[in-house]
Amino acid sequence: MTTYYSEEHEWLTVEGDVATIGITQHAADQLGEVVFIEQKEADDEFEKGDEIGVIESVKAASEIYAPVDGTVVEVNEDLEGNPGSLNESPESNAWIYKIKLADASQLDDLMDLDGYKAFIG
Amino acid sequence: MTDAPKRTPLYDLHVELGGKMVDFAGWDMPVQYPMGIMGEHKHCREKAALFDVSHMGQVILTGENLGEKLETICPQAYATLKEGKARYGFFTNPEGGIMDDLIVSNAGDHFFVVVNASMRHQDIPHMKANLDGVEVTEIFDRALVAVQGPKAEDVVGELCPAARDMKFMETTVADINGVECRISRLGYTGEDGYEISIPEDKAEAVARAFLAHEDCEPAGLGARDSLRLEAGLCLYGNDIDNSTSPIEASLSWAIEKRRKEEGGFPGADRVQRELAEGAAKKLVGIKPEGRAPARQHVEIQDLDGNTIGEITSGGFGPTVGGPVAMGYVAKGHGDAGEKVNLIIRGKVQPAEVVALPFVQQNYKR
């Protein structure tokens, strides 16, 4: 199980060809209090860079961009009723999707934790 | 604007309190403190909040017949504004659009005017050019703070007993902590409260004295925006601008009967025509039925899919506990209870036209 980070402030924890995706604590802190999330549905396919959801905080709407190509296999449906959990535990309970990776080699473009920490300064 | 944002006299206090600073209209202002927008908003509705609004333009007018002269550039009955009273108003342009909104106070030997931060550069020259024989002096050496909320009277009254006896839209000069301040009982949150103009070198001490009250917490521009939105109050640049008339903006209440009948202000022909015949569009409250906030520029459609307007302000209302918005709808639409659709990121979201405000205003009349 390895965790990767994107420059769009997402984390991906990979097991085999399935990755669990969420936003980082840093991203959650920047967004402010989350009041709404719009998610894709299971079986939706997407490519790296596609918009795969929107998070609305009291301040603004922020798109979630796909860090890799893949297919949604599971949606965390708890978030709809409890969007505030994205502020409380964005890197654990408040995961957003489980996805099937289309091309595992794309993970090489992502950062590890040390790289991400350096990225956010 | 390429210059570094300006700092208010309370800048160091904001930083000390953990304010997240952003550039707003050329000013380095706190958008929120560690409590967060939601908490600050609720604290203001339940207790009291302190806002720094020093970025707004404070202006002194001196000269003869100030009220009459203001009536030549504003549709408000400022000639009959009594000493010790404040009144909301706006500058109109010859086409009947709103150039800016403002608060005018009759301070006896002068008038005290507060205009929007983003429009200072326009409003000061506008007044200088159009108010004959009036000295227009922009004040740069005073802070402006707002203490708002049901406990505002306690917070301010503890340091300034005279403030307790004031009513909504009254203004006076009184000592706070030994400092002479201008205190006006008004605000931009829908709650009871005060706006207080303080000499800049004493502003931090006065602000700290308010914050020392157990019911008073600092709040930033984020909460200020969600509070005014729930209160149904217009934001210049979003809900009203150079093209929108006061009648379209549902601000007819802010123009007194005499002025509606007599005119005599820029754009009076349009205002009078729209009063008689109705305006082409009007500003209404919009309550999305789902959870998705509808923000500025979201399209409003009727149930047949025809575009009938656009959201001008919208977001999450912490006190309402859901999304709230304001927007313009075309003539023939906009009665409270009308069902409409909002197009949010390409998806149709049902909503309803509602009467403003979203939360009851709690002014001390």
Image (cartoon, grey):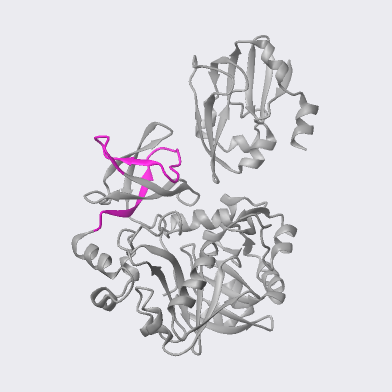
For image coordinates 74% across by 63% down, the residue present is B12
List x then y, in percent, for residue B169: 45, 76
Question: Range of the magenta residues?
Answer: B279-308
Is residue B168 a member of the stretch shown in magenta?
A: no
Q: Residue at x 61, y 41 (%)?
A: A31
Q: Residue at x 58, y 51 (%)?
A: B37
The image position of residue B313, as x and y in percent, is 44, 50
- Up-down relation of residue B261 to residue A8 (above or below): below
Asked if residue B362 can be seen in this view, the reply is: no
- Quarter in which the C terminus of chain B is drawn: bottom left
The magenta stretch spans residue B305 = yes
Query: How many numbered markers are drawn?
Result: 0
Residue B109 visible here:
yes
Q: Is residue A84 above or below residue B52?
A: above
Q: Position of residue B288 (x, y in %)?
A: 38, 42
Question: In the image, A43: left or right of B92?
Answer: right
Classify A102 as above or below B74.
Answer: above
Coordinates of residue B304 in the picture (x, y in percent): 24, 35
Q: Between A77 and B271, which is closer to the camera in this rendering?
A: B271
Viewer-proximal residue among B346 and A54: B346
